[in-house]
Image (tube, rainbow, N blue to C red):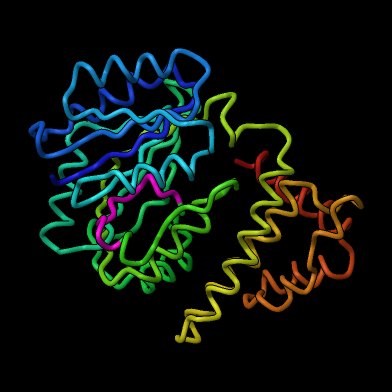
Amino acid sequence: MLLSIIIPVYNVEEFIQRCVESVLSQGFSENEYEILLINDGSTDNSSNICNRMGNIHKNVKVYHKENGGLSDARNIGIENAAGKYIAFLDSDDYVIKNCYKKMLDVGIINDADVVMGNAINYTNEKTQHPKTKKRKTTFLKENGETFLVKSIKSKSMSMASVLGLYKKEFLLKNNLKFKKGIFHEDELWTPQVYLKANIVCYTDLDFYIHFNREGSITKRQDKTKNALDLIKVCYELEKIYEEVTNEQNKRVLQDYIAMLYLNAVFIGKLTKKEFRHKLDPSFVTRNANSIRNKIKARLFLLNKDLYYKLNYLTKNIKRRIL
């Protein structure tokens, strides 16, 4: 079997059929691919819809489990996948016809550990915005660490795991599982994937359609949990990046997590007194390497409230200009 598409399912009765049908139109024969629907304790009609599609299509396999979160569902999918390559697809999104087949061909021809494409972001069915920054090339083949660093430097890096195909043998060999119980699991998982990958191929293919729907985790008003989890991710990445031997690459990666840490503080409003004991101000000063991040880190260290207010003002001005 060539490809396993893992789709975690949780209370998405309005979207799951569209999602699965988009995979069924990928141009494969039935024995070349499988769809793994991991029902993560849905309380709506999602489980029944999954069962119905599993009964209709032999290559749609349904797994029911107690609610354990996105990472847990994806890990179960990895464990049960039979394909040479694995793809992740969120159940309220969908993919463009025949694109998985095109990406898989790139992976097999180049014996790639990872094949990456692009997403298009929608706020509704009609309003479209670029999701991932376009690179200047239509095809790229590089070592994973090099790809990660270059993408961060060019600001074209997306940590979304759904934008890639991953060789299953590569994931298992390197024990690349998603950390359970946290938001922003991709921010932790994806860099580790690249640091382990020998060959990463990028193809300039807009294949993934992502919806920013109301009620999703990313749209929740209270970002405290998101921010605190992102802080934890930064601490873990700091330890991982210490093992990078190329000093120039290490500096880029460290600077990125300094930026990520400061963004977490801002989105979660962690400058409030009740959260300050959870912060390590020295984190940003020891990891920031660019002039921009060094200035932000210094301001954050001297006056957290002023840092938050200036950041808030800057972002509001940018929104008005755009």
Q: Residue at x 19, y 44 (%)?
A: 3
Q: Along the horizontal axis of the image, is 115 left or right of 213?
A: left
**Residue 168 highlighted magenta (yes or no):** yes
Q: Residue at x 46, y 54 (%)?
A: 159
Q: Nearer the viewer, residue 46 or 130?
A: 46
229 up-or-down from 88: above or below: below
Residue 59: quarter of image: top left
Residue 46 in magenta stretch: no
Above or below for 121 versus 190: above
Check the picture and name the quadrant holding the N terminus.
Answer: top left
- Extent of the magenta region: 160-170
Q: Position of residue 230 (x, y in %)?
A: 64, 54
Count the numbered circles shown: 0
Quadrant in which residue 139 is drawn: bottom left
Instruction: Name the one closer to the observer, 129 or 173.
Output: 173
**103 above or below 220?**
below
View extreme (right): residue: 273
Residue 48 screen position, x and y as percent: 38, 14
Residue 53 lies, in percent from the top left, at 26, 18
- Tell me the quarter of the image containing the C terminus: top right
Q: Which residue is painted at 28% across and 39% down in the image? A: 5
Tell whether 296 sits left or right of 150: right
Return the x and y of residue 111 as percentages of the image width and height.
16, 64
Of residues 1 and 242, the one nearer the viewer is: 1
Name which residue lies at 36% across and 70% down: 196
Q: Quadrant of residue 30?
A: top left
